């Protein structure tokens, strides 16, 4: 299984409509690949909140309108913030039937107030256990952060290091939401508290954007990247339905399975894209993926081992934190970054000699976890 | 709207710009007229479509493309509908709006006008006040708008101190303090400087539009456009017809308000229009209730917010508006209708006399 092409839009507050964004990403992916749109046999669409935000559902048919007269089998996939990777996971399974599949993820989030966004994003939590208690998403991860700090001695300064690294990386990614923005340690440290201990710069932004990936059963060109692991696990939706609150069990299980499929270990990873919807989740992800031991992620960021020049570069595109988090597009933007890195086409943020990369995409507060592993082979 | 690839002639109903099949340019198809091929009359309301009945037409244009269109006019099958040329549709976006006065209201209207796509000319006798207003708009937009879009919006606002810059304005809105003589001066000057097609509007909340229009030669061109504070957030615009305002001018005012994303309501030129005529007796009554000393200010406000579902209690609102302003409007209403129910209550008069005017003096029904 191969990635033939990747494409995306800029992330941020954009003027384009949701269909226009999806189209741009598909267009870019098609012309990044060696095949044409007529070679595509099926499409998977990833989107989380088209209903609440844009009053637009039935997105598979909207995409059909964007591809006039092709009348392809198209299906929308929704697993909250993991929708992008889940669509890819489904598409990979569907390669048993189709030769070439296009996966497109899109989200339009900026036509709403912050309060509406808090409510919409809250839909990734349990209606009864979480939403009725006002547990907005920053609060979900604030609880994880508080637990992590209590158990391992992680500090807010460690979270600030994650935010600073990802904002710095986004300065090298022209398509990132915050590419234009100089963010200093002081700004991060002095920002408003959102849900203690998390402050504004611990949270990913509300972004518009789209990303697309084309995969195939067969190799078509030397730029193709191998897909060597694809795994999806789920867990109880609410933190309150679980016993452990400092790691995400689904992510641990999914990475274990994906490593087995790929016949590698965490030590083999050259570049990793993790789901840093909140800075604490980058630390949790490092531990869940086995990049470091539980409780040691703080030491890794203090020693700058995850910067672009570090041992295991994480979120070279700026991550959800600074590249942006247009939910439906996020998982596919991670694939865009890993593919671009493995092809050696990442420009100023290129990780030298990257051969194996992983994407870690989480729905809600770990209710869904999807891991993919990619490899460049000569 | 239909968009077509110049090379392979595939068609979209979205502005996709470039063809995913052949990389050709995709441009909008020009349409001159459409034929009604089908229709349905909708009898039940839904959010955004509360006025019923209305028709949804299935139109086929002269290029063979279909479109759904809502209409309050009924058509028969086969009826022809002339389509406005594209340039005319964009005409709305090319309007120039002048604003006299760069205070809170003038600034808010200027911001919304520029966001609508209008060219805005903001006039204040003191250039510095206008500059400050512009930088305030900059700050407000920064919170919600992407940098390049913000620059585009700000680029549509020009600042001047000269009335002759308004010569080609389509609409000039006066947003000065409530001073009839001052407003009359301005109207005279506007009629001197502007083209005869320019429509004049006043944002007054209490003065008589008919009286103001006495100074104009063409009295049909003046209309009341009463915006609410804060302008970017408040959805309502009261359109006030004087005795002389022409229907064309009222229609134009409705169109502009709608383009700005506001909901217009039309009312006659009587003191308080709709909102203030209803609001001030209510505030007055709340103040009178407060003075019988059986309920605290906080309890009266709580009763109204929770019992009537108002976003803010009347006493907090009176403090926000300013008690002197409340009293002045009540005086106007009393003067106009000669009805005892509009007479400012004793407590209000005493507080105004003492100089406890609400937020702006730090003390009203609450301390600030």
Image (cartoon, coloured by chain):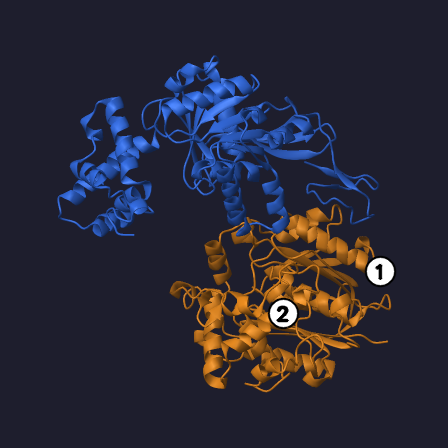
Chain colours: A orange, B blue
Q: Mark 1 lies on which chain?
A: A
Q: Which residue is drawn at 48% across and 76% down?
A: A144
In this figure, which residue is indicated by the disc labeled 2? A166
Using a 10 Å C-alpha cutoff, classify the residue at mark 1 as few (fewer than 14 neighbours), some (14 to 19) or many (20 or more): some
Q: In this view, does A1 lie to the left or right of B35?
A: right
Q: Which residue is drawn at 69% across and 70% down?
A: A316
From what the image shows, is residue A326 above or below residue B251? below
From what the image shows, is residue B72 above or below residue A156? above
Q: Which of B36 and B354 is in front in this view?
A: B354
Tell me the quarter of the picture where residue A206 sits.
bottom right
Q: Residue at x 78, y 56 (%)?
A: A30
Q: Is residue B130 visible?
A: yes
Q: Same chain, marks 1 and 2?
A: yes
Residue B85: x %, y % from top left: 68, 26
Q: Residue at x 71, y 25 (%)?
A: B32
Using a 10 Å C-alpha cutoff, classify the residue at mark 2 as few (fewer than 14 neighbours), some (14 to 19) or many (20 or more): many
The quadrant of the image that shows the C terminus of chain A is bottom right
Q: Which of B359 and B90 is in front in this view?
A: B359
From what the image shows, is residue A50 above or below residue B340? below
Residue B284: x %, y % from top left: 22, 37
Q: Is residue A239 left or right of residue A305?
A: left
Q: Is residue B83 left or right of residue B243?
A: right
Residue B262: x %, y % from top left: 48, 36
What SS does tag 2 mark? Answer: helix
Q: Nearer the viewer, residue A172 or B350?
A: B350
From what the image shows, is residue B97 above or below residue A308? above
- Marker disc for residue A34: 1
Q: Nearer the viewer, mark 1 or mark 2?
A: 2
Residue B23: x %, y % from top left: 82, 48
Q: Is residue A275 visible?
A: no
């Amino acid at each position: 299984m191969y990635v033939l092409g990747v494409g995306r839009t800029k992330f941020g507050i954009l003027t384009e409509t949701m269909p226009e964004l999806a189209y741009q990403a598909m267009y870019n992916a098609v012309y990044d690949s060696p095949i044409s749109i007529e070679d595509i046999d099926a499409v998977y669409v990833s989107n989380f909140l088209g209903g609440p935000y844009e009053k637009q559902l039935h997105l598979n048919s909207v995409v059909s309108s964007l591809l006039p007269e092709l009348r392809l089998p198209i299906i929308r996939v929704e697993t909250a913030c993991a929708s992008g990777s889940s669509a890819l996971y489904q598409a990979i399974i569907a390669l048993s039937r189709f030769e070439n599949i296009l996966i497109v993820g899109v989200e339009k989030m900026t036509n709403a107030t912050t309060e509406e966004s808090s409510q919409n994003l809250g839909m990734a939590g349990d209606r009864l256990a979480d939403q009725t208690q006002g547990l907005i998403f920053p609060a979900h991860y604030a609880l994880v952060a508080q637990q992590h700090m209590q158990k391992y001695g992680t500090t807010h300064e460690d979270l600030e290091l994650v935010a600073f690294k990802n904002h710095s990386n986004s300065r090298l990614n022209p398509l990132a939401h915050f590419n234009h923005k100089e963010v200093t340690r002081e700004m991060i440290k002095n920002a408003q508290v959102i849900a203690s201990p998390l402050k504004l710069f611990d949270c990913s932004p509300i972004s518009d954007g789209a990303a697309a990936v084309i995969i195939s059963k067969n190799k078509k060109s030397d730029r193709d990247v191998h897909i060597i692991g694809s795994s999806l696990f789920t867990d109880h939706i609410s933190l309150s339905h679980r016993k452990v609150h400092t790691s995400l069990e689904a992510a641990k299980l999914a990475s274990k399975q994906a490593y087995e499929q790929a016949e590698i270990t965490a030590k083999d990873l050259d570049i990793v894209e993790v789901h840093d919807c909140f800075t604490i989740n980058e630390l949790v992800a490092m531990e869940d993926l086995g990049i470091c031991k539980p409780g040691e992620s703080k030491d890794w960021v203090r020693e700058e081992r995850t910067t672009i020049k570090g041992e295991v570069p994480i979120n070279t595109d700026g991550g959800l934190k600074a590249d942006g988090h247009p939910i439906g597009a996020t998982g596919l933007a991670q694939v865009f970054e890993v593919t671009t890195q493995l092809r050696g086409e990442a420009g100023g943020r290129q990780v030298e000699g990257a051969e194996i990369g992983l994407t870690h995409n989480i729905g809600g507060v770990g209710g869904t976890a999807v891991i993919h592993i990619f490899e460049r082979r000569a | 709207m239909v968009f077509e690839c110049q090379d392979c002639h595939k068609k979209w109903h979205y502005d996709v710009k470039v063809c995913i099949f052949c990389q050709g340019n995709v441009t909008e198809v020009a349409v001159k007229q459409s034929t009604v091929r089908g229709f349905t009359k909708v009898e039940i309301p839904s959010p955004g479509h509360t006025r019923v009945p209305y028709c949804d037409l299935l139109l086929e244009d002269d290029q063979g493309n279909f479109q759904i269109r809502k209409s309050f006019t009924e058509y028969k099958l086969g009826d022809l509908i002339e389509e406005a040329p594209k340039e005319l549709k964009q005409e709305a976006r090319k309007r120039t709006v002048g604003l006299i006065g760069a205070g809170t209201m003038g600034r808010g209207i200027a911001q919304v006008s520029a966001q609508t796509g209008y060219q805005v000319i903001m006039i204040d006798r003191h250039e510095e006040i206008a500059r400050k207003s512009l930088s305030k708009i900059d700050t407000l937009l920064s919170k919600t708008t992407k940098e390049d879009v913000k620059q585009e919006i700000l680029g549509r606002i020009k600042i001047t101190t000269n009335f002759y810059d308004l010569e080609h304005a389509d609409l000039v809105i006066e947003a000065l303090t409530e001073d009839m003589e001052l407003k009359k001066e301005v109207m005279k000057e506007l009629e001197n400087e502007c083209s005869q097609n320019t429509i004049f509007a006043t944002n007054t909340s209490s003065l008589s539009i008919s009286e103001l229009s006495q100074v104009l030669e063409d009295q049909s061109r003046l209309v009341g456009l009463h915006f609410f504070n804060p302008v970017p957030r408040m959805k309502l615009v009261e359109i006030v017809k004087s005795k002389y305002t022409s229907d064309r001018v009222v229609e134009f005012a409705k169109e502009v308000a709608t383009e700005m994303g506001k909901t217009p309501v039309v009312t006659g030129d009587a003191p308080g229009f709709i909102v203030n005529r209803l609001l001030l007796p209510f505030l007055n009554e709340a103040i009178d209730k407060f003075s019988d000393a059986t309920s605290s200010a906080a309890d009266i406000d709580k009763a109204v917010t929770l019992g009537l579902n108002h976003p803010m209690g009347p006493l907090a609102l009176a403090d926000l508006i300013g008690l002197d302003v409340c009293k002045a409007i009540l005086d106007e209403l009393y003067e106009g209708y000669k009805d005892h129910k509009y007479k400012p209550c004793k407590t209000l008069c005493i507080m105004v006399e003492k100089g406890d005017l609400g937020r702006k003096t730090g003390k009203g029904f609450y301390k600030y």
